[in-house]
Structure formats: C-alpha cells, structure tokens
Amino acid sequence: MVFKDINIAFLVHFSEMFNHYSPVWDKLERNEFLVIVHGSQFERERTIEACQEYRVNYVIIEDVLAEQHRFPYLISNHAMHAFQGVPLIKVLGECNIRFMYALGKGRHNFSEWNHYYDIFLCFGPFHEQQLTQFNAPSVQMGYPRYDIYFNQELELTDFKQKLDCDPAKETILWLPTWKELSSVDMYAELMSSLMDSYNIIVKLHPLSLEEEPDVVAKLMNLNFTAVITTVVDNVFLFAISDKVVCDYGGTAFGAIYLDKPLLLLNLPNASNDPLSGENSPDLALREQIINIDIFSFHKIRDIFNDAEIWQEQNLARKKLRQYYFAPHYGFSSEVAAAAIKSAGNIIAMQGKG
C-alpha cells in the first residue's frame, strides 16, 4: 500500500480509539482510509495489533512526517501537540475533521485548539451549540460506537462467564476517569465492600493502564469481580450492567445514551479542575442525575434498591438524551461516514468563518 494514494486518515494515539472509529470504518471501503499510528510505544504496539486483527491499513507517524505528506482529510479527536512549531494535525492533514470523543471535561473539550479544525463531527445539539464559537460547520452524528447496541442482539453469556459474574447478583459497572478527577483513591475500598451483594466490574480510563500503574495495582489488590485492563468495548460492559457508576468525564454520557441507570460519585473541588471548569457538562449532569459524596456513600445500597429513584431517572435520561445527542440510534456511523466523505462539500457550502 502506498499511503500517499489514500485520501482519508485517522490519527490514533491510543488503542481505545478503535472502539470509537471502527463502526465508521465498517461503512468505508478498506482502501479508502488508513490509520496513522501515534502515541507511546505501549499504545503503538496495541494499536498495530488491533489494526492487523481488524485488517485496516496503517502507517507509522514518523514515516508520514519524513515524507512531509499531508492527507486530504485527517480525522482526530483533539489537536494534540505541535511538531516543529506547527499543530500536529495541521502538519498531517489539509482538511482537519474533529471526531468528538466524549462529553464531559468541558474546559478541555472546547479549548482554543478547536480553531485548528475545519469541520466537527459532534454528538448532538449541545456539542454543536458549544462549537459555534469556532466558526466551522458541525454535523450531529450521534454516538457511532454504540450502533451495535441498537442493531443486533448481543451475545453476552460467554462474556459474563469470562468476567466471572455471579448470575444471582446484579452487576454494577464502575467507570472511573483518570488523574485528579478519578474516584479510585477515595472510593475504591468502598466500592469493593459492595461485592457481597453485587458483581462489581471496573474499567479504568484507557490511559491509566500505562500512566497510572499505582491505580491499577490498587484495584488489583482489592476484591472486584473484574478489573478490565485490556481493550474491551464499553458497549458490552454497558449491556451486562444493571447500574452504572461514574465520576467525571464522558463515560456517564454513554450510560445516558444507552438508557442505563446511572449514579455519580462526587469529588471535592471538581469544578476547579483545569480540564472541567464550573460549566462542564459532567458537573451540570449532577443537577438531574443522582450523585453522592464520600460522606453519603453508606446510602448507596438503599439507592440501588429504590425503584422510585430509577423510575424518576428514566424521565431525566430521556430529556438528557434529547439535549446531548442526535437521535441517530443504530445508524450514527452511517451519518459520520457520509459526513467524512462529503466534508469538502459541507465546508464549501457552509464555509468556515
């Protein structure tokens, strides 16, 4: 394969991105795109292995940079660092398409580096509203990574057995974020204490696996049904869960998109975090979704067992889905793929201010 003959490239700096992009890749021909492998050596090895398994073409970023080649269309989830004083995505791509990765951590998500993008593929009305300040067209695509949840009956029996789930217990999925906003340090022992009544499955933020070995070790030393340290698509974890527990970042919105009962763990001074900010959607979510702090954790079992709480939350989740997501349930990847292939026309028609 000669990478210079390819028009569409996806910049992948950690392997978890496969779960976001692969449904869209399935709507493209394999010779229409390739993956630019970026990131740490640990992540590169996992990405290359995934590319080979998924049978997608790939190229190492240094080979592209050495040739000073720019792809006509480059898809990435954020602008990353500079290369020789120029934003990396501008070095690699002529037309830059931001494929929104998540809701949450609003100060990061809507930072000034969005000006480097020519078009946005966003989740829904909220994203589009926030992105208007960057004077580039947006396409509301929904949430492509979860199309499979709506399109087919997932085979979950073997998956549950692999995770050692007790069929007599409800399953709680805990999805902590990383760094300062992670709930692991404050809540890990408390979450583990629920194991007598529930299956507790923990999946860390994908970057924690390499960058926070102490966090991984802490969880491994506690009693949980499973601690996920491999690339596992969240759609299967959501599918087997009865309740979902999150802290900050974007994972809570996956639960809302898939209509899963959701509880949030609070950390003190979260609004002061440099990635979130006081108006971040993961903070605003707490106005409508039940949340607890360390001092009220003792109520969590009663909350899990209170049918009235979850009945009321059903209505809240419906309104939140309408606010945050385009209603393309099951065909978001088609919308995204069509937008990528038509990006030039969209920009020409709508322009970039």
Image: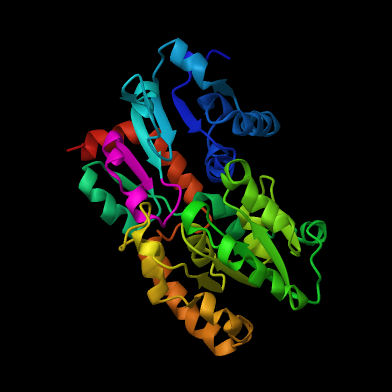
The residue sitting at 40% across, 54% down in the picture is 123
Q: Position of residue 191 (x, y in %)?
A: 65, 70
The residue sitting at 35% across, 63% down in the picture is 271
Considering only vertical position in the picture, is 65 above or below 266? above
Q: Position of residue 20 (x, y in %)?
A: 53, 45
Q: Position of residue 107 (x, y in %)?
A: 33, 52
Residue span colored magenta: 100-121
Where, quadrant-wise, is the N terminus in this rendering? Answer: top right
Does the magenta portion include 149?
Answer: no
Considering only vertical position in the picture, is 184 above or below 42? below
Residue 298: which quarter of the image? Answer: bottom right
Considering only vertical position in the picture, is 342 above or below 302? above
Seen from the viewer's position, the closer of residues 298 and 312 is: 298
Does the magenta portion include 111?
Answer: yes
Seen from the viewer's position, the closer of residues 100 and 195 is: 195
Report whether 1 appears left or right of 324: right
Residue 273: which quarter of the image? Answer: bottom left
